[in-house]
Amino acid sequence: RKLATELNYEPNPAAIFFKQKKTFMIGVILPNLSQDFFASMVTGIEDVAYKMNYTVLLCQSSDEQEREKQLVTAIKSHRVDGVLISISKETTDYEHFQLLQRHKIPVVFLDRIPKMPDIHYIASSLDTGMQQAVDFLVQGRHKHIALINGPRHLPASQERLEAFRKGLWQKRRKYDPSLVVYSDLSREGSCKAMQELLDGKQRPDAVITFNDYVALDCMRYIKQSKAGEISFVSFANEPICDYMDNAPIASVEQFPYQQGERATKLLLQLLEKQAGQADEPVLHHELLQTRLVVHRAG
């Protein structure tokens, strides 16, 4: 040790990793790092990883399936110990995720979960959140509640729709398919969806949107087109809403930091079990309870 100090010796990480059969690196693939929602998720991930001496290899799919596939291949080549993934809005093919499974690389999905068997995931309860949103609007005497959902194929959109119908049924409100439209989550797509509602036979007096950005785009569109007053409730509860005079009247808090934190803890637990036993780990599914945050009177 004395000689090593005198010679300024530094251990070779590659040799240590080879001996321990670990790189102490986890890959993370998220849809859009410019959104506060996913930025908060990254903070939760890195806080846990840092405490456990893991390095995070952070990647952004930009909500594109092909880019997501390339990133999965890239992080596999970096010999990461495990991966955290929130799927893109375009993702319909899950073969690249199955590639990780075949190479026995533990994966935990968070927030946006693929329709795959035998996976681990951490997410927020969209069912509970949607019912909270519907209850709030019904109590506010809104009679015609619409839904601007995300892409049809996205599992999170399907869950929102099912919860929306359930929430209306529980309040003895009739479900009207014409009051459900879809957005590709771009500004143009959201404005087009809003116009579709305005052009319909039944004009909505309240709209629940896939997330805050969809709500803000639609609210801006309505103001510019002078379409009148419509109340909006959204998902995600982005911090920007606290600083706006004209934010959605309420938003469903999905706790992205806690999702990132718990998903990372779960992944590290899976890595420990993988190193210590040959048995397949028990699948872990966890839904965090949501909370409706009211920003102003409807």
Image (cartoon, rainbow, N blue to C red):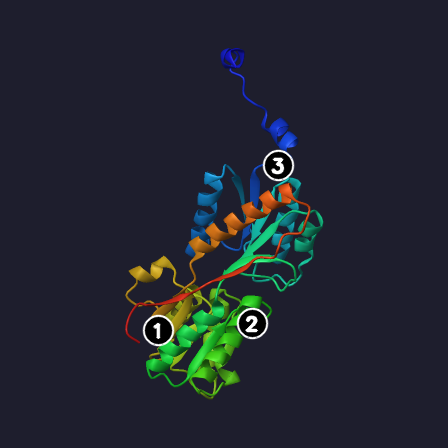
Give the residue displayed 45% in from the left and 73% down from the top.
130
From this view, report whether residue 200 is shown above or below residue 120.
Answer: below
Quick check: 130 left or right of 88?
left
Is 167 drawn above or below residue 262 in the view shown? below
> Mark 3–mark 1 contact, CB under 8 Å?
no
- The first of marks 3 and 1 along the sequence is 3
Between 112 and 195, which is closer to the camera in this rendering? 112
Residue under numbered circle 1: 223
Give the mark count: 3
CA distance separating discs 2 and 1: 29 Å
From mark 3 to mark 1, how far is it between C-alphas?
55 Å
Left or right of residue 203: residue 284: right
Query: Mark 2 belongs to which amino acid?
Result: Gln
Q: Amino acid at mark 1?
A: Lys
Badge 3 amino acid: Lys
Q: Which mark is residue 158?
A: 2
Q: Nearer the viewer, mark 3 or mark 1?
A: 3
Q: Which residue is mark 3?
A: 22
Compared with 264, 244 (above or below) is below
Q: Name the spot of residue 30 as percent of width and height, x first.
A: 53, 53
